[in-house]
Each structure stands twice: as structure tokens, then as C-alpha cells.
Amino acid sequence: MAAEHTIDALGQFRLFPALGPLGASVNFTQSNLMMLISSAAILWLLWAGMRPRAIVPGRLQALAEMAYSGISGMCTEQIGSEGKRFFPFIFTLFFFVLFGNLFGLLPFAFTYTSHIAITFALALMVIVIVTFVALRIHGLHFFSYFFPAGAPKLLAPLIIPVEIISYLSRPVSLSIRLFANMVAGHVMFEVFASFIVMLAGIGTLGVIAAIGPLALNVALMGFELLVAFLQAYVFAILTCIYLHDAVHLH
Amino acid sequence: MRPLATLAVALLVSSPAFAEGMPQLDFKNPLTISQIVWLAIIFFTLYLLLARWALPQVAEVLEMRAATIGRDLDAARLAKAEADSAVVELTHATREAQASAQASIASAVDAAKAEAALRSAELNAKLDIQLNQAEQRIDIARAGAVGALRQVATDTAHVVIARLTGQPANDDAVNHEVGAVLTIRGQA
């Protein structure tokens, strides 16, 4: 057997139609299937968790309540008292990203947050909502956001473009941060896994040596679980911070 | 190693050579764009279901718990206030009972003292009367005795004189002498 293995680290991100011919006819991809599964899991967590409606919660109910009060606390802490209005949106965003990251770590699963199209669409939605909220609350006064009060008027031609660029770069940094983290993790999984297969192809010595990349992948899995939570948290908290800016203008 | 890999991915996205190999940047594939449409549909549906159905359930349970805890705390506070007032009442009642017991003991002692005083006064009065009667009787007896003394003295004087002189004594002289002696002694 010729060990003609090449490392195809990017093949895992290829999109395929899911759900058979019906899915193919409406261009429904496996990425969208994972979204459905994540959404169902989020809804199931809250439904099954809150079904007992217990005064002293069980484990699942405690988890559901922790999810609720955690995001609720984040909204009110970051945005202020107006944060309650955005709570369902932040909750949806956080758990949609979190479950996408987490379920993507399961074998044979697909990580929809590893697609720049998805993360950029989410980030664009955030920035459009933030801008809409700011215009709704402050009207045209919102544009004073691009020129900090007290700055010398002479510097306006410099400050205003910089502020506008930094405002517009928000969705870019927001989407690339999540996308790059997810892609990097999954590429490393694939690379180390390919090493295992390639080493095992050499012979007995190779099988023993393959323990190295296997151990690395086990450690990486723990790390990726952390990253999955961290990136979802970062995405949600940055959205909260942008909303705080929109509500309070600095 | 991990942050470097992330940075590498972020940088490589912008390089056209790498981008060709990345399925994420293959915008010729209709699935790349179509998944965004499905994302919009799924995300919006999830948002509606969470905002209208799932999250209010959690809020309801949390509010119910807060209300129950509040109610229980109020009940506990009420019970504590009741217990406190009962303790105050009990202390008050104990003090009152002690005071009334003390008062009744004092009045009983006073009554007993008064009765004892009355008794002793009665007894004193009775004894005084008896003493007076006794004194009167003594006086009468003494008077009787003194009266008899004159007779005895007179008779004795007659006998002594008769024996000494051999002649009967003069009655008047003897009476006169006995009277004089008795008068001197204060026993007439």
C-alpha cells in the first residue's frame, strides 16, 4: 500500500446539499442542517429544562435558568437598563454561535461558524441593528458619534474618517475573529489526524509514533471546547458593547 | 501555536492563492450564498420562538420563584414579629404576676400583723383589768389585814401588860398607844 496521503485540511469545509433531492432543489446545505439541529437543541434545552417549573430546580432546569440569567446579566451589565429589550436577540445570537461551535466539534458534524459567509452575515446583521437602534434613539444626532466631543475642530478631517473606518471595520473584525478561530481549530484537528493516519501507514514504529499527534488532538479538543465558549461569548459581548454605544453614544 | 494558526487563517483569507483552495471563499458555488438565505430564515425563526415562547417561560418561572421566596420571607418576618410580641407579652405577664404575688404577700403579712397587734392589745387590756382586780383584792386584803393587826396588837398588848404587871391593862391607854405606833408605821 502506497502511503500517498495528502493532507486535505480544507475539504471539511466544503458545502454539500443536505436532506436529499428536496434539500438539493432548494440549495439546503449541511451547514443549514446543523443550524436546524443547533436551534432545535437550544429550544429543547429551554423546553425540557423549564418543563418541571420547579421552585428548587433540577440539573437541566438549573442549566436553562443559568443560560437565561447569564445572558440577561450580560445585557443589563453591558448595555444598561435598556439592555432588557435586546435580551432575546443577544440570547439567540450567543446560543446560535455557541451551539454551532460546540456541535461542530462532534465527529462527522459541520461547523457553520467556520464559514465567513455565515459569520459575516451575522456580524452584518449586528451592525445593521446597532446602527438602526442608534438612529432610532438619537436621530441625526447619532452622527456626532464619529466626532468625539471636545476634540479640536482642526483635526476633524482626520478624526472623522478614522472613526467611520473603525465603525465600518467592526463587522469585519467581528466576523473574521470567529471564522478564523473556528477554521484554525478544525484545520489543526485535520492536520494532526492526517499525521496519525500517515504515521500508522509506515509500520509498527509509526503506529507507536502516532500516539503523539493523537495526544495532541485530545488536548486540542479540550482547548477547542474552551474556544467554542470563548468565541461565542466574545461575539455576544462585543454585540452588547456596540449596542451600549448605540444607546448611549460613547 | 493556536493563536498563530488563527492569525495565519485570518491573513491567508486575503491572499488570492490560498483563497482558491478555501471552500468558504468559493462564491461561484451557489451553496455558499444559499446557506445565508437559510441562515436568515433559521435565525429569524429561532429568534421568534425564543422571544415569544421559550424565554418567557423561563422568566415566568424565575418570577414565580422570586415571588414565592418573597412571600415566604414576609411570612417568616410576620411570624418573627408575632413571636417577639408574644415574648414581650409573656415577660410583661410574668412581671405583673410577680408584682401581684408580692402585693398579696405583703397585704397578708400586714393583715396578720394587724390581727396579732389587735390580739396582743386585747390580751393586754384583759391582763390590765385582771391586774387591777388583783390589786384591788390585795388592797382589800391588806386593809383587812391591817384592821386585824390593830385587834391583834391590842390583844397582845393586853396579854403582855397583864403578864408583866399582873393587873388588867387600861383599854383606853392601850388603844391610844397601839394607834400611835400604827400611825407611825403607816399602817393605821
Image: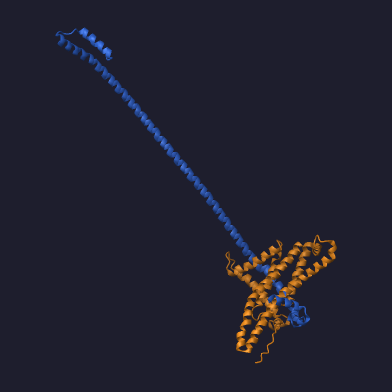
Dividing the picture into quadrants, the one containing residue A59 is: bottom right
Is any atom of residue B92 visible in this view? yes
What colour is chain A? orange
- Seen in the picture, residue B5 relative to A91 is either above or below; the reply is below
Q: Residue at (66%, 68%) from the top-left corner?
A: B53
Q: Residue at (24%, 18%) from the top-left corner?
A: B145
Dividing the picture into quadrants, the one containing residue A227 is: bottom right
Residue A208 image position (x, y, % from top left): 60, 85
- Between A164 and B51, the one lying in front of the other is A164
- Seen in the picture, residue B79 relative to B35 is either above or below; the reply is above
Residue B72 image position (x, y, % from top left): 57, 58
Is any atom of residue B48 visible in this view? no
Q: Which chain is blue?
A: B
- Seen in the picture, residue B186 relative to B37 is either above or below; the reply is above
Q: Residue at (45%, 40%) from the top-left corner?
A: B102
Dividing the picture into quadrants, the one containing residue A48 is: bottom right
- Seen in the picture, residue B99 relative to A107 is either above or below; the reply is above
Figure label count: 0
Report whether B44 appears left or right of A153: left
Q: Residue at (78%, 71%) from the top-left corner?
A: A169
Residue A111 image position (x, y, % from top left): 68, 78
Which colouring convention does the figure follow?
Answer: by chain
Quadrant of the image for the N terminus of chain B?
A: bottom right
Quadrant of the image for the C terminus of chain B?
A: top left
Residue A86 image position (x, y, % from top left): 71, 65
Q: Residue furthest left?
A: B166
